[in-house]
Image (cartoon, grey):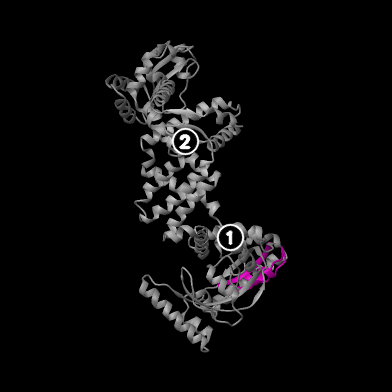
Amino acid sequence: MLTLFLIFTISVLSYRQRKMKTKHIAALAIIASSAISALAKDEIIMTVNGVDVPRSEFEYLYHKNQQQQVDPQSLEEYAEMFKIYKLKVADALHQRLDTVSAFKSEMNQYKKDLATPYMTDSIFLNSLVKEAFDLSKEEVEAFHIMLAKGPSDDETKKAREQADSLRQVLLNGGDFSELAAKYSVDRASSNSGGRMGYIVSGRFPYAFEKAAYSLAPGQISEIVESPQGFHILKGGKHRPARGTVLVEHIMKMVPPTATAEQQAAAKASIDSIYKVVAANPEKFEDLARELSDDKGSGRQGGKLNWFGAGMMVEPFDSASFALNVNEISMPVKSQYGWHIIRKLDAKAPASINEIKPLVLKRIANPQDERFNLVEKNLINNLRKKHKKILQKQNLDDEALKEVEYEWLYANEPDYRNLLNEYREGSLLYEASVREVWDKAAKDEDGLNEYFNAHRDEYKWTKPHVKGILVQAANDSVASLVRASLREISDDNGFKALKKQYIGKASMDKVLVEEGQNAMVDNIMFGGEPVTPSNKKYTVYFIFDPKLLDAPETMSDVKSLVTSDYQNKLEHDWVENLKSRYPVKVNEKVLKKVK
C-alpha cells in the first residue's frame, strides 16, 4: 500500500520533472526508500482508501486537538472525526486538487520555510554575529577612493580596470590624497583626501568594513567591490567605540559660494544666538524652531536622531561626543555652516545580544555579502551530509536541497507532521470550498428548494415588517420615488433607482420587528414621530409594507437557510465519501493511544 510519504513524494516528483533533469529523480528515490524504512516501524492505526495512517501522525493531531479544546473529546469521538477528515482528504486527492499549480507552489514554499530552522547552521551564524560584535568594539578611521560602476557591463569593467591602475600607482608611491581628489566619485570624502572620518561597523558593505578594520595605518587594500562601485582603501587609526549620542542643534548655514560678508554675517548671527542660550539654556529649543537654518530638525526644537561615529560630518561628530549630557557647545564650524550643539543623552556600545538581531536581519538580505556566505556554508554542509548520494548523482544546489527536504521528512517527526498537517489541511479546505461553501453560496435554486421543504423550521416570535423604507427631501420627491418604485421589477432596477435619486432620497429594504427601527415603529406600530438623522430628508414612508408572521421567501432568512443548507451539503458529502472510500481502523493500535 502507498504510504502518506509516497503520496507526498509523487506530488513533489511530478512537479520537479518539469523543473529538473531526470537524473535527480534517482536521488529522491533513495531518500524515499529510507523514508519507507523509517516509517515501517510505525504502527498503522487506520487505512483510508488504501492509504495507511501511522499511529504517530494520529497521536500528533489528537494531542494537538486536545490541547486546543475547552472540552476535550474522547478518543473514540476524535477517531470518528479523524476518519471524516481523512475521507475528505482522499476526495481532494481523487479530484487531483494537489496537482493545481497554485497549491503546489504554496506547498513548495511552505516546505522550504518549514525546513529553514533545520537547515540553519547556528554555529556559523553565531560566528558572523561574533565577528560583527568584535568589529563594533572599535571605530576605525577610513580613507577610500571610489569608482562608480557603469550602467553597462563594459563601463563597469572599465571602472574596475581603472581601479586596478590607481592601486598600482599607490603601491608605487602615489599620493592617496591627490588621487582621491582627482578620481573618487565620493565627493563627501574626496575633498578631504579620501578621509571618511571614523566609522563603525554595520553601516557599510561587509567587504568594505572587513577591509577598513583589517588594514594597518597607511596600508593599501586590494580592490573592494560593493554594490555601488569599486573601492581602494587606506588604513587609518583605531579607537574604542564611543556608542551613540542624542543631540539637538541650532544651525546657521554657510553655502560654499558664500562671500566674505555672508560668512561674517553667519558668524555674527551664531555668536549672537550662542550668547542667548549660554545665558538661558531653556530658550534653546524655541530659538532652534525660530532661527535654525536646518528646518527639518528645527521643527523638533533642533533634535536629531541618535547617531554614531561616521554618521555626521566632522567636527560636528567629535564635538557631540565630547560634550557632557545637557552641556551646550560653543559655535562649531562644519562644511555646511555653524552649529550650536546641546547633548541630550548617550548610549554605550551595543552588547552582543543587542547586535545579534540586527546582524541576522542584515544577513537575511540577499544584497548582503554574508547572505551568500551562509548559502555557501549550507551547500557545503549538505554535500558532506549526503556524500553517498552525490557519489551516485551529480546534483546542482537546488536538487541537493530537495534531497535534504526529503531526508527531513523521513527523519524529523515534527517536520513531517507539520508538513502533512499543512498539506492535508489545505486540501481539505479547497475540497470543502468546492463541495460545501461555494455550492451553498451560489446555488439559489438549491437554497429555495431547501427553504420550501423546511418552511416550518423558520419561525419568528414576533411579526416582522417587510418593505422599502424611503426618506426623501420633500413631498414632491417622495411622490416621484413612489411612482418609480412601482415600475421596477428586480434588484438591478432597484439599484439603478437608488443611484438616480442620490442626494434627493434614500431607499433601503427592511425586514424588522417592532423596536428595531424607529421610523418603521412610527409608521406601522404607532410609535413616536422621528426626525431623520440626515437633515436633507424631511419625509419618510414605507413602500409596499407587509406585516409578516413568518418568512415569506428564502431571502427573508437567507443567512440561516444558507447555514442549514451547508450542513446538509456537508452531511450528504460525508455520507457519499463513506460509501465510496473504504476505511479500516486497527482497534488494537487505537487502544494504545494515550
Total labels: the figure holds 2
Magenta stretch, residue numbers:
317-345
Whether 134 is drawn above or below 83: the answer is below
What quarter of the picture does the C terminus occupy? top right
Task: Name the amino acid type tagged 1.
Answer: Leu
Badge 1 crowding class, 10 Å Cα cut-off, few under 14, some 14 to 19, many 20 or more, is some
Left or right: 218 in relation to 581: right
Who is closer to the viewer here, 32 or 7? 32
Residue 52, numbered label: 2
* Residue at numbered disc 1: 125
Q: What element carries label 2?
A: strand
Question: Upstream in the sequence, badge 2 or badge 1?
Answer: 2
Whether 332 is drawn above or below 103: the answer is below
Based on the displayed image, in which of its 4 quarters is residue 273 positioned? bottom right
Residue 197 visible in the shown view: no
Q: How far apart are marks 2 and 1 (CA)?
A: 40 Å
Tell me residue 189's x, y (percent).
53, 76
327 within the magenta span: yes
Left or right: 443 in relation to 321: left
Q: Which of marks 2 and 1 is in front?
A: 2
Tell me residue 461's x, y (percent).
49, 11
Who is closer to the viewer here, 380 or 465? 380
Tell me residue 223's x, y (percent).
49, 77
Q: Is mark 1 on a helix, strand or loop?
A: helix
